[in-house]
Image (tube, rainbow, N blue to C red):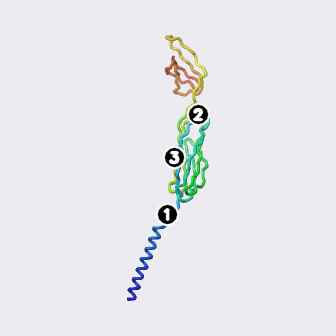
Amino acid sequence: MGRRSYFLRSLLLLALVASFIACDRATAPPPQKPTISLSPTSLSFTATAGGTNPASQTVTLSNTGNATLNFQASPSSTPAGWLTVSPTSGSVAAGGSTSLTVSVNIAGLAAGNFTGSINVSDPQATNSPQAVSVSLTVNHPAPTLTSQSPTNAPAGGAAVTQTVTGTNFVSGSLVRWNGADRTTTFGSSTQLTAAI
C-alpha cells in the first residue's frame, strides 16, 4: 500500500507542477514594444515659382505602445532636397507624443506637382516604418502686362496682330480682346502675339 500511496502522491505533485507551469505561461505579460502613430498622415503645400517658401506644418508623433519609442525621421522626395523634417531622431515615452516640423524649399523648382514622404521608424516598434505623404504644388507666377501694341483696332477693319509684352507668360497663355480669347502664339515668357 505504501508504494501505491507514494505513486499517487507523485502523480498529484506532477499534476500540480504542470498546473503551475500552465498558469505561469497564461499570465506572462506581453512583450514591451513601442507603436508609432502619426497625425495627420498627409500634408499639402502650395507655393508660387520664384516666390517665398510656404509655411512649415506640424505632424504629431505619438507612441501608443508600452515601451519607449526611439525614432528616426527622414524625408524622401523627387527631386531630392526640397523636403525636410525636424527633429530627425529622438525618444518618446510610452503614451507620450512629440511634434515633427515639416518644411519645403521651392528654390530651383519649376512650376509643377511634386510628391514626397516623411518616414518614421524604430526597429523595435510593432508597426515600423510609418509614413506621412507630402504633396507640393508650385504654381506659375501671375503674369503681368507692361504694354500692348496696337492699343486699338478699327471695328470691321483688317486683321491686326496684337503684341503683348510683360512677365511670367507660359505656353498656353491667352490674349483676350473684347472679352474673347484669341488664338495666341507664345513667343517667350515676356512676349505673346495674337490675331485680332
Seen in the picture, residue 76 relative to 7 is either above or below; the reply is: above
Residue sitting at 45 percent across and 67 percent down? 26
Few, some or many residues within 10 Å of mark 2 (<14, 14–19, 20+): many
Residue at 53% x, 49% y: name it: 38
Rate crowding at label 1 as few (under 14), some (14 to 19) or many (20 or more) other CA atoms within 10 Å: few
Residue 127's disc is none
Mark-to-mark CA distance, 3 and 2 = 26 Å
Residue projecting furthest to the front: 95
Q: Nearer the viewer, residue 91 or 97?
A: 97
Tell me residue 12's x, y (percent): 41, 79
Q: Height in image: 83 above or below 179? A: below
Mark toward the viewer: 3 or 2: 3
User: What number is the disc on residue 41?
Assistant: 3
Q: State if disc 3 and disc 1 touch (CB < 8 Å).
A: no
Amino acid marked by disc 1: Pro
Seen at 47% across and 70% down, the residue is 24
Q: Earlier in the sequence, mark 2 or mark 1?
A: 1
- Disc on the earlier residue, 3 or 2: 3
From the viewer's perspective, tell me whether residue 15 is left or right of residue 90: left
- Element at badge 1? loop
Dividing the picture into quarters, in which one does residue 141 lie? top right
Find the distance from the CA under tag 1 to the CA under tag 3. Answer: 28 Å
Q: Amino acid at mark 3?
A: Thr
Percent of width and height locating residue 80 = 57, 43
Residue occupied by mark 2: 49
Q: Which residue is mark 1?
A: 30
Q: Determine crowd level at label 3: few under 14, some 14-19, many 20+ residues with C-alpha closer than 10 A.
A: some
